[in-house]
Amino acid sequence: MKTAALFLTTALCAIAAPTDDFIAAANAKHGASGEKAARFLVEHMPPADKESLSAEFLTENLDLAMKARADFAWAKDVPEEIFLNDVLPYAVFDEPRDPWRADFMGKAAPLVKDAKTASEAAEILNRDFFKLINTHYHTGRKRTNQSPKESIEQGKATCTGLSIILVDACRAVGIPARAVGTPLWWNKSGNHTWVEIWDKGWHFMGADEYDAKGLNHGWFIDHASRAHADDPMHAIYATSWKRDGGIFPMVWSPKSASVGGVNVTERYAAITAPIPTTIGVRFFEGDDRSVRKGSLTTESGFVLGEFETKAGTADLNDTPRLSVTPGKSYRLRFEIAGNAMETAPFKAGDKDMLDIRADDLTPVPDFSDANAPLSEKDAARAIAFTYETMLAEQKEARAAEMQAKSFTMGDKTMRWLEKTFGDAPVDGRSLWISMHGGGEAPERVNTQQWQNQIRLYQPEEGIYIAPRAPTDKWNMWHQDHIDPMFAHLIESMVALRGVSPDKVYLMGYSAGGDGVWQVAPRMADRYAAAAMMAGHPNEAQLFGLRNLPFAIFMGENDAAVNRYKVAVEKCAEILELQKGDPEGYVHLSRIYPGLGHWMNLKDAEGVPWMAKFTRNPWPKKIVWYQDDVTHHRFYWLRLPEGSAVKDQKITAEIEGRKIKLTGDVPPGTQILLSDKLIGLAEPLEISVNDKVPFTVKPVRTLVAIRAALKERLDIAATPTAVITCP
């Protein structure tokens, strides 16, 4: 009878725990250190435990804790206060009190026998212990605060039950351990519990979530970094046996104050500050989570990365975390029964977790027939997708050029210096191309002028670059290699540096001003505004400036090669052009009295003046004049190969549903159309040089989009339909 009674007392935790007997036994076996440990344990025990736990239960727990401290190398160096608070306790939360320590020591000790540190031992336990006991995450467990025995019997536990097991396994082999958690994540997506172990400081890990990268890693750290220390519902707490006023809030027992706690939020904020912005993904088929391979894509559908969702034993908040940029729009794509299906667009930053349901997905648009008619919506998506695809093929090479600040076309190389000013606006940075002076001079002279140019102007915002002319000729800025090189530079800056294609500005001083006179009119469709400082136009004409705001700056004493005289003539000429076409030829003319070739930086007023303008890639009227360097595309007109010749002039304008072309219009001239220019849902009337007009219904196609982007990687100026004139 005595044996049976003793068994029941030990196994079932008999009523009326004799704590005095426990303290006396601890002193008798372990001396003063044992008595101190026993008194600490009893002093901070929950009141219910003092009434229910037996001396035998408490003694076995203390004896095995002291044995672990003596047997394991890392345990010997643990400070006494840490040992008492985070190795000695027999419980983590308010779970049923199992005598787990002997069993767990027997199972854990062989696993960690070769470990050299507490951290190494803890990682081994997290990797192997749950496999040994065959217990993993499952929402079908009976309750949240299960004891180790209950969880092992079911083979199921949530994050709280798994954390209890890992804390106890660590304590069994002398590793200080405690549970950590939050009542509610900052975004109200749920609660979570994990584990910290002490090894000359506290380190964290997810229970049954071994990470080969080591401690202080886990799917939850981005969440943890956003916790609020001063908000009890969104703070992070660690359990503490010692009760000195703090509590651990238990979501399964919100009114209970039986478990001590410490607010550790600030430490997590410091640990996880570098984590990039991410978003989690869960996939549901019916009411159940399922494992699905998916892709993160841009809004247009360009694939950015692959992932796989989780189910089964994975914590509900343990999901793939996809790196995203706040404010940008994305989609998710999945293969369902052999079909490509996708979500509606979502904007990063609006949510931290996406629950995707199979029934809500829609088929990915089929663009396999490049000649098939497109809706306005699908055409816009096709432009973005094609642009992103073409850019991806060139991105590595262009990125290397951006890094080197140098690129080569044919036998010419362009280098540049750059400075960045101000914060990047939401709609993209501005780009300022500023051409240096010099000319027909030794290389060192032009290089010195180049190095001076980077210091001349300071926009309030933007990337200011001073390119080095590829040659040292007098006309170094208006030779035929300059236009394609500037186009390439602009495209790369837009694609890789966050520049808006509609905020690109051209300027230049002296020989650089010569270049502005020439390049601005023939590339007017690339720029938002241009400013000429102390340059000579030579044979350049101003017709092409119809939609490009243009500033002229000259000192009245700048007499070399008649610069002042010609500048005055050009000021008058552009004024006359504006009088004849009041909606075009916006300009600013400045002839500074008493100044010569150097204008004492008074011309810097051109920078804020230009910054007021943005490019209109789809103006209703264009005037195209070919200089000695010819082009085959200008705004929304394209000429057949070989048909562009010097002094060729074409005017194109839109009135209502009519498009009128006049001037030197060769057969086969193409009109490049977009809904941004004119609605394409209804037929258009086209006339060329007052001939009998013809009517045509534009058709948006992928063919037109691909051809346009192949010749010009300019997403803002990409047409969706093409009409060829007879």
Image: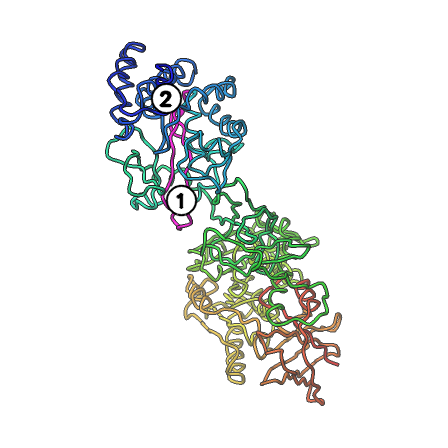
Q: Are marks 1 and 2 in contact (CB under 8 Å)?
A: no
Q: Quadrant of residue 310?
A: top right
Indicate the position of residue 275 as horizontal and vertical percent values: 46, 43
Label 1 amino acid? Asn
Element on which disc 1 rests: loop
Specify whether residue 178 is painted magenta.
yes
Q: For the N terminus, give its image quadrant.
A: top left
Horizontal relation, residue 471 to residue 215: left or right? right
Above/below status of 147 relative to 447: above
Between marks 1 and 2, how big is the CA–CA gap?
A: 37 Å
Is 574 magenta? The answer is no
The correct choice, above or below, for 324 with respect to 137 in the image is below
Give whichever of 637, 466 is nearer the camera. 637
Q: Nearer the viewer, mark 1 or mark 2?
A: 2
**Residue that mark 2 sits on:** 8
In the rendered image, which quarter contains the C terminus?
bottom right
Q: Measured from the top left, where is residue 152 in percent x and y?
A: 48, 31
Magenta extent: 174-202
- Where does the image place residue 497, in percent across and percent down from the top left? 53, 54
Question: What residue would you read off at disc 1?
Answer: 191
Residue extending furthest toward the front: 1
Q: What percent of the width, then of the height, locates residue 323? A: 52, 48
Looking at the rendered structure, which numbered label has been put on residue 312? Answer: none
Question: Quick check: 624 left or right of 199?
Answer: right
